[in-house]
Image (tube, rainbow, N blue to C red):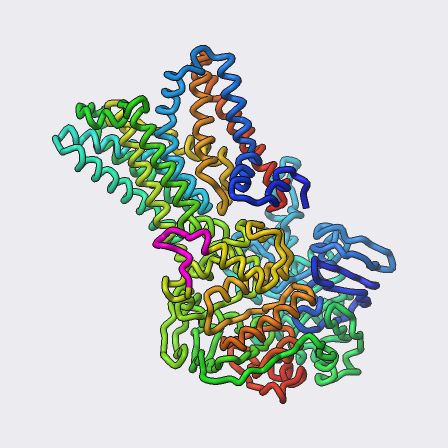
Amino acid sequence: MSTNPSLRVTELSTRNVQLTKYVLRSGILVAFIALLIIFAFTAPYFATFENLRNVLRQVSVNTVVAVGMTFVIILAGIDLSVGAIVALIGSLAAGFLQAGYSLWLVLLLMVAIGAASGAINGYFVAYQGVPAFIVTLATMTIYRGLAFLRTGGYAIPIANDAFLGLGRGYLGPIPTPVVVMVVIIIIGHVILTMTKFGRHALAVGGNEEASRLSGVNVEVTKLLIYTMSGVLAGIAGILLAGRLGAGSANSGTGLELDAIAAVVLGGTDLMGGRGTITGTILGAFIIGIISNGLTLLNVEPFYQMVIKGCIILFAVWFNIYGHRKGAIG
Amino acid sequence: MRLENISKSFPGVRALSGVSMELKAGDVHALIGENGAGKSTLIKILSGAYIKDSGEIFIDGKKVEIGGPQHALQLGISVIYQELNLVPYLTVAENICLGTEPLRNKLGFIDRTEMLKRAKAPLEFIGVDIDPRALVADLSIAQRQMVEIAKAISHDCSILVMDEPTSSLTESETVKLFRVIETLRNRGVGIIYISHRLEEIFSMADRVTVLRDGELVGTLPISAVDKDKLVTMMVARKLSDYYTRDQVEASEAVLKIENLSDGKRLHGISLTVRRGEVVGLAGLVGSGRTELARCIFGIDAFVEGEVMVSGKPVRIGSPQEAITLGIGYVPEDRKKSGLILKMAVRENLSMARLNTRNGQTAELLSLGSFIRKRAEEALVEKYIEQLSIKTPSHRQNVAKLSGGNQQKIVLAKWLAIEPKILILDEPTRGIDVGAKAEIYALINECTKRGMGILMISSELPEILGMSDRVLVMSGGRIRGELAREEANQEKIMQLAI
């Protein structure tokens, strides 16, 4: 039906070709490399070890959230509450640490609260049939409201060095949040490509009815994916609070949009059924590089917002254009 | 209006070939034929939903090319489909004037008084008492149909096509509809009336056209035919050679259903499927066959009755439980509910097997939650070969395969769970003759391996050619059972209508 070269490549059909096909067709890898080259030549200090390490640290929070968002969008869903969960977890963690709770207990509690927040979303989406957009729009307000109730609008300082280390520290030469991010990326990729659960996510997103008739428990799959998104947002909240050195109800504002942008930039189909973690990583890195490069170029933050938006719009436009030519409607 | 030599093909099927018919002003012209005879395709060409491949259409002696739905309306052709096309949360008047709203000024403000007036006129004309300010969602099906008719009249239609208008009406509503049709006829509107109910056709049609397999059988004045003659025209044809059923000695019952009712569409269904047997389930569209299959497979619940698998009473609450019991279900619409079009052959084919309880089938496809890629690939390759599925590789996206190969993948998906009972819902719909023959061979093979098969089909030759026994459904009940030897098309149609 089409003479799109990337499609002809598919017929060669090996696993790697399949993966790269996604990436190539969305043009994301090209954009990523182009941005690296442009900034390396134009922005001072961009291509230094310290700066790139810094970029990685900055993107870690968004990437962790975006891994969860990838699964949600593969379901043809959306999770707008992740930024608020980040704020809620940061605020609660700071509060508990201030009250003298032990580090491990706090970490465990935060992951559990993240899971519960996500499970609430998942319950309403999967079992009550409320559209994901509405459910998570509502819980976004609720969770951020709870964060403000906890902090009273002030940042709660964190004094626990081990906790701060999660956001600021290093394991060898690598920043700790980057290590966490890599672990989560690997787990996410393995779940999506190698397990029944990942297969079910793609199946439910592709065709709910056919999945149900094939014995997939559609509701449980949805519930678990929203729960997972909540857990990852919780972990991101811990990393961010550690980096900021405080729990603030204002943190993570707009993070949900950055995560969605990363996922969509990465070629995951907003209509569900198709997506990769590898694409999402590239998407998140591109967003990070744009911010970093433009800052180094002394572009005013307000212009940065405009430029970032334009790049995302064009990349996604290109992606959709590629899909349309790609014969699969 | 005159149609000459209209043809239309879809990939793999010839839906209409060289059909001609003539509709006179003020005539009620019945169009009948089995499911899949080409009636819907023909009216979709008239409504502009499909573009014909060849042939000519004349309206008032002038040749026209219907370019799309808007154009059809301009030409005075209105079609009222079975599933009515009204916007539920707009008022009756808004629906009637949809797309042709009277404007108060150039800014696009709607003139509500004028709109109500315009809506009232056609409603009064057909003599129905419906408030044009009412919401369509609050109306009964019969009332909505009247609104559709009013809408058609307001478009000044000279040709009105009605697809099964009485299928969801009560008796008194039907009488009322006939009165309206009478009014339209007297006004000179040409009406094409599609119905499965032959009594209706005799009570109101002037002429009748019969289609079969996309071809015209004939057009006759209603006075020249009787019911038996029509049934013969609809179904008479030679059984093709490719229906070869190798019968297997049927043994014990694998599936037994007693007195099943779902409280809505199904009433007191009892049936038995034995090992090695193909039980054909015939009936018209809407007779409850698919609903029954969905109940057995645990998709929909039933309120009364008992299901026994291999002699043991079971409660099937979900497809997962059905699969665990060894039941497979090939649904009627493979694109909507059989396949995941965004996925490859491999993922589609292994989908059901992956969801069987471990240990139930010989080799395990997964270790814990992890999919064993090699075992999966081996399984998929085995079935690709066994069913000779034509695909470049198991990584091929299923959307790009032909209908026949897609259907084989759905079948393979269920064969992979090694089922005891296989429910096939329209197993050969929309696939070419070659692929059909292969699927029949496969059905024979399955019964030899001891599966019991319940096959729903609207194609009578298929039912007759492949079934060891035929059950005929109508109105949510089983109307009769025919042994292979005594079954023929006439007997089935008599029971089904």
Residue B66: give x, y in percent of width and height. Answer: 77, 53
Whether B17 is among the magenta residues is no
Residue A282: give x, y in percent of width and height. Answer: 46, 31
Q: Is residue B311 above or below residue B189?
A: below
Residue B120: give x, y in percent of width and height. Answer: 63, 57
Could you say which quadrant of the image residue B497 lies in? bottom right
| Quarter of the rendering occupied by the N terminus of chain B | bottom right
Name the residue located 36 percent from the left edge and 73 percent from the top edge: B315
Q: Is residue B361 above or below residue B350?
A: below
Q: How many marks?
A: 0
Could you say which quadrant of the image residue A161 lies in? top left
Name the residue located 64 percent from the left edge and 51 percent from the top edge: B97
- Side (left or right) of B294 relative to A229: right
Could you say which quadrant of the image residue B15 lies in? bottom right
- Side (left or right) of A62 relative to A147: right
Residue B333: give x, y in percent of width and height. Answer: 57, 62
Name the residue located 63 percent from the left edge and 50 percent from the top edge: B98
Identify the residue at the far left of this view: A100
> Could you say which is closer to the camera, residue A13 or residue B264?
A13
- Side (left or right) of B305 relative to B242: left
- Would residue B144 be visible to someone looking at this image? no
Whether B365 is among the magenta residues is yes
> Could you say which is closer to the camera, residue B145 or residue A157?
A157
- Would residue A167 be visible to someone looking at this image? yes
Name the residue located 71 percent from the left edge and 62 percent from the top edge: B13
Q: Is residue B456 above or below residue A107?
A: below
Identify the residue at the far bottom of this view: B486
Magenta stretch in the rendered image? B363-375
